[in-house]
Amino acid sequence: MKKIITATVALTVLLGITLGGCDSRVVIDPQPIAPLYKYLAEYKQMPEWRRDSFETVDSLPLRAMFSFMGVDSLGDSVLVRWSESPQVKIFTPSVDSVYKTLKPIEATLGRIEAKAQNEGFVLPHRSYAAVVWGNSKSVVLTDSCVLIALNHYLGPDYIGYKGWPEYLRLQKSPEQLPYDVTEALLATQYPYKPGKENTVLSRIAYEGALIMAKVRLVPQGTLERALGCTATELQWLEHNQADIWNMLVAKEFLYSTSQEVASRLVDPAPRTSVLGAEVPGRAGRFLGYYLILQYLQANPETSLPSLLQPGFYTNPAVLISE
């Protein structure tokens, strides 16, 4: 397994990737991130005039956050209780220790959105807000906001993740954040549309297109990070790619319409057990990436957005022989 990097080093890497590797033709504007978690942590100590200003200026992300958590009615007492909650008291100091500033993330998100536009993706405008909470979701999109739970990106060695399976802890690095936001943006705007006739192959093709998009849109994107695997796991998958395809064929999975099988091939897991105990998790996404890569090599004029449309991924012709 690859060496676990510290959150501080990962944030340094994140800063580095915002400074280069972007197409010079792309106009880049950093995407401001409202530090909602910080404001809420300080809310109880705010003077009354600042509380009123906070609730007015930051009302959109504020209401989006609490609405997601099931709180529809906001008021001074609700915000005071939240500022004293265990989530805020535990996570806010940890987030502050890792994220001295949000500017590197803002610059990276600006590059992602600019490159997405350059690739032909149509993404509705949403504001960004940084939050902390006890929910298992790390990135949540509402109609108006992208809520990024920074307590999910404190580094794999963060004590709060102790006891979690390694495959989950490895996704908790600041370096993973832009990949997760990119996937959330694309999968929300271009969701996989299941149907009775959809095959396992169609799901693999869709997931592969998502991976390809993440590699292309995230500055200096890597397949390892886009897949969310380790260097060792990626090496194993690459070395055994032909055997994995053969397993899919032998088990008659490719044209199966079983959504359960499709999910077991692409959903987060320590192993892709439907193929074998030795196969790393989410192997279907790896196969999908190379399926898309070969398709693009043969059809270089194809746009990335078209690969996330049912007209593409439900077409059996996308299968390229190994």
Image: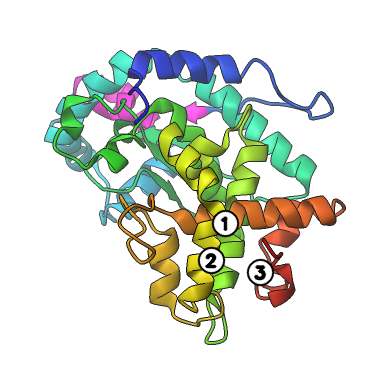
Distance from the alpha carbon under mark 2 to that under mark 1: 6 Å
Q: Which residues are magenta?
A: 33-55
Q: Residue at x 55, y 64 (%)?
A: 204
Q: Measured along the vertical axis of the image, is residue 264 above or below residue 102?
A: below
Q: Residue at x 79, y 30 (%)?
A: 26
Q: Mark 3 or mark 2, which is nearer the start of the sequence?
A: 2
Query: Which residue is disc 1 drawn over?
Result: 242
Query: Which residue is disc 2 drawn over?
Result: 246
Q: Nearer the viewer, mark 3 or mark 1?
A: 1
Query: Which residue is disc 3 drawn over?
Result: 313
Q: What amino acid type is highlighted by mark number 2?
A: Asn
Q: Nearer the viewer, residue 50 or 238?
A: 238
In the rendered structure, the answer to whether residue 14 lies left or right of residue 152 reads right
Screen quadrant of the C terminus? bottom right
Q: Secondary structure at mark 3?
A: helix
Q: What amino acid type is highlighted by mark number 3?
A: Tyr
Q: Nearer the viewer, mark 2 or mark 3?
A: 2
